[in-house]
Image (spheres, rainbow, N blue to C red):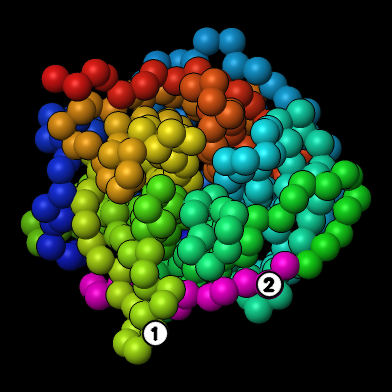
Amino acid sequence: MIARRGHPVATGRVHLAVAATLSLVPTLVGCAGGDAPLTRRGQRAAYVRADSMGVIPPTPTLIRAHPRPDLLENSAAALSHTQAGVFFTINDSGNDPLLFALDTTGADRGVWRVHGSTNVDWESASVGPCRSAPNDCVYIGDTGDNQERRSSRVIYRVREPAARTAGFTGDVDADALPYHYADGPHDVEAMYVAPNGDIFLITKRPRADAAGRRRPALIFMLPADAWTQRAAPVVAELVDSLPIVPGSAPLRLITDASLSLDGRTLAVRTYAQIFTFATDSLTGRVRGAIPPGVCNIIALDAWPGEGVTWFGRSGKLLLTSEGQSSPLQVVDCPMPRSTP
């Protein structure tokens, strides 16, 4: 969500050359530590000039969406692994706890009220394995915290519903996993679930180290068995960092992430770029020795946007933007370089 508005550096497998390059990009527009101003197509010229990093996708495909009226934000995108062309999305903070399905033609495929949940600041979603059900689950992250003041957050999961026709309304029941971070609150809009069921959370906002230098984005992990270990509070473990430095350019704040269907590639979106990382196909962990691919999406027609998921198995990416009238876009972005 575009809002108005240190800890020890992770020892993860950051590709240092890329991280160093990103950390040198100055903040040219906006306030340090806050989101960029809400900007639309007619106001994006300054941002295009300010941050030219990445390959511009050739000939993106625009898909006119036909969502139901109660889909107000379209803040995340989570592709089904078993229902071809279907993805799930959510409204963000303060809205009703609803899970929406669309397909890659832009059509409405139903909405479900998520019982046992509250939408305090829903910002992330993913599809992944679910040990309590024979099929996949949709994971919904009440992970947003613009002011970074909340002592705990919640992940919900529901058994993946079957997509229906336009206008369908149903109900699903949620399991809830409250958790917190050992080092204090974080604002997170990017979440993905690995093939082994582990949940990964990527921080959105600028952070400084003891010397005042901007830090790379942090990756926290909730293990798959956290859902059954309720004797003690669940703590998200800091496991890695990414060569993306939030705040090092005007729109470089992380808004979504999506793991490919084969588990081998992770797409991470900011307002201005998409980074693609090689990942271990079982654990979902980033293979830091392999440089990421980067594409620049500032100049796309639907701008700014937040959500990203995969366009099936095509290797292309599907982008969503906030607002009822915002179209979907399909883009080709560079993939991670081959293993050295």
- Which residue is disc 1 drawn over? 230
Left or right of 188, for residue 337: left
Q: What is the x, y in percent for residue 191? A: 44, 53
Residue 165 visible = yes
Secondary structure of residue under mark 2: strand
Q: Which mark is residue 173?
A: 2
Location of residue 18 (image quadrant): top left
Residue 153: where, in percent of width, then height?
45, 74
Badge 1 marks a residue whose secondary structure is: loop
Q: Nearer the viewer, residue 246 or 179?
A: 179
Asked whether 303 or 136 is in front, the reply is: 136
Q: Which residue appears at 57% of the width and 63% of the height?
A: 133
Q: Is residue 111 magenta?
A: no
The three-letter amino acid code for the residue at tag 1 is Arg
Q: Which region of the structure is painted magenta?
A: 172-184
Q: Residue 12: where, in percent of width, then height?
A: 15, 49
